[in-house]
Amino acid sequence: MPYLDFDLSQKVTLEDVVAAGLGVLLIVVLAVVARWLLNRAIDRVVHRASKGAVPGVLRHGKAAGLLNELRPGANARRAQRAEAMGSLLKSIVTGVIGVIATLMVLSKLGVNIAPLLASAGIVGVAVGFGAQTLVKDFLSGVFMILEDQYGVGDVIDLGEASGTVEAVGLRVTRLRDVSGTVWYVRNGEVLRVGNLSQNWARSVLDITVGYESDLDHVQAILKQVAHEVYEDPAFAGDILEEPEVPGIERFDKDGPVLRVLVKTAPLKQWDVSRALRERIKIRFDAAGIRIPATITAPMATEGQQ
């Protein structure tokens, strides 16, 4: 326990008591006012941060219209993130003002606070060395929330663990993979994050056909099928732009590989990919086009569903 030095050699008069009481009251009032003003400022910042707009790269075309329809959910998530950071800032402000006001009150009452400050410094150094990992996790969690790297409901890839985010805390992130396993990942251990569901996604299909196939005919069928899916009312809110068929992606041992690219709403790329596979198979069978290998897609777009 720190040694508190009270100077009892001097006589305490009524005037001294009144002056000390008024000083303490003034300190408390100033602390309350300062906390109220800072909380008001934080509320204003949180209110501004909770407002957002469609990303600039998506402001034109069908993507902007569809994302505007999706914005209520995005705005709610942005508001939750801003409120979480606001609550954290308010807690920090309250703690700092409370500690400063307490020390000032003790000093006003004649308590020698130097031993308290020295003890607090020693304890702070000890805690800093002993809780480096905890502090690292906490700071990483703060920046993840502040930067909106991912949120609840996003499908992310953290390296060894990947899946749907179920909870984002200041210390750990909880996610569930496609097999149902729940992973708890410390925020300080996250070195890179792959978010498969932020703003928009892309369905990427690589279709292999036989070397004897008429590639012009194959590309025409792929474009037609992709356009039909794009115009299908069932996918009106899922596909953001006209699908692309760039052409031959590469040559495999089984035949040339053609790629189909479809820009979709978040988390809709897997449904669109399944529909495209089914329709492409039906059209290829009708046209007598042989598929020597299964249709595959890169892990970046197909990894979780």
Image: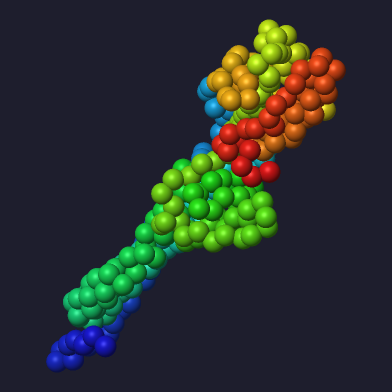
Q: Is 115 rendered above or below residue 94? A: below
Return the residue found at the far top.
216
Image quadrant of residue 3? Answer: bottom left
Name the image colouring.
Answer: rainbow
Q: Is 180 rendered above or below residue 264? A: below
Q: Residue at x 81, y 16 (%)?
A: 288
Q: Is 69 rendered above or below residue 6? A: above
Return the residue found at the far right.
286
x, y (%) of residue 55? 54, 27
The residue nearer to you, when weighing 248 against 288, is 288
Q: Residue at x 68, y 30 (%)?
A: 293
Return the residue found at the far left.
9
- Image position of 57 (left or right of 304): left
x, y (%) of residue 153? 64, 47
Q: In the rendered image, is residue 101 in sight?
A: no
Q: Residue at x 61, y 45 (%)?
A: 155
Q: Residue at x 75, y 13 (%)?
A: 221
- Image position of 4 (left or right of 266): left
- Image position of 106 (left or right of 49): left
The residue nearer to you, when weighing 180 against 234, is 180
Q: In the rendered image, is residue 185 in sight?
A: yes
x, y (%) of residue 195? 54, 41
x, y (%) of residue 5? 19, 86
The residue nearer to you, when weighing 287 against 63, is 287
Image quadrant of residue 298? Answer: top right
Q: Is 148 rendered above or below residue 11? A: above
